[in-house]
Image (tube, rainbow, N blue to C red):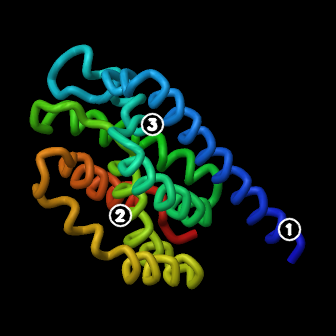
Amino acid sequence: MGSKTTALASQLKFVLYLMLFFAVIEGINILFGRSLNIYGIYPRELIGLRGITFSPFLHGNLSHFASNIITLGIFSLLVMQYGKKTYITVSIYLMLSIGVLVWLFARPAMHIGASGIIYGYFGFLVLGGLISGRIKLIIISLIVGFFYGGLIFGVIPSNAFVSWESHLFGFIAGLCAAKLWAKKR
């Protein structure tokens, strides 16, 4: 029991540091009048490629940041239940694949925010537990599906200022990540 408590404490600490990192970047971006947002993804423009790695850390305003940070923290903690190595692998895969897909196929606009990663984690968590066959992970899948199932409507174009493309590509990439890394042991 002691090692599971230690593992959970370590995971919580990691997630808190991750959230703090995002908050520091948000603070810097506010101080500079949101000028860091030029480092987002601008599709099919060479300069927009830099956004593949930077865009998840940038947000349009405090409301955008707040709507992403809590869910990002919760989903990060849940994905860590597959192991830290899987969490890191899935996170890097999501960031790169979503970024490339948005750069290749999204409408010409600046795409920023962590919501693509959130949708990727959502897809991973919903399908991953079922694929894994592990009771704990199946329960996580069911809980995420029940409480966050409404996210699926975010993949539909509804607002000119929302990157539904990031949501759609994130969800698809998350499903692919589940097929790749949530296999039965």
**Which residue is drawn at the image coordinates 43% and 78% (left, top)?**
130
In this rendering, the label closer to the viewer, 1 or 3: 3
Kindly identify which residue carries mark 3: 57
User: Residue at 73% of width from left, 53% of height from top?
Assistant: 13
Work out whether 181 lies above or below 185.
Answer: above
Q: Are marks 2 and 1 in contact (CB under 8 Å)?
A: no
Judge by depth and name the residue closer to the eye, 132 or 40: 40
**Which residue position is annotated with label 1?**
3
Left or right of 23: which side holds 119?
A: left
Element on which disc 2 rests: helix
Does residue 16 appear to the left or right of 122 in the view shown? right
Lower position in the chain sequence, tag 2 or tag 1:
1
Query: Label 1 neighbourhood size at 10 Å, few (<14), some (14-19), many (20+)?
Result: few
Contact? badges 3 and 2 (CB < 8 Å): no
Secondary structure at badge 3 equals: helix
Residue at mark 2 = 123
Name the quadrant of the N terminus. Answer: bottom right
Mark 2: give few (<14), some (14-19) or many (20+) Cα within 10 Å: many
Residue at (59, 62) in percent of width and height: 77
The answer to which of marks 3 and 2 sits earlier in the sequence is 3
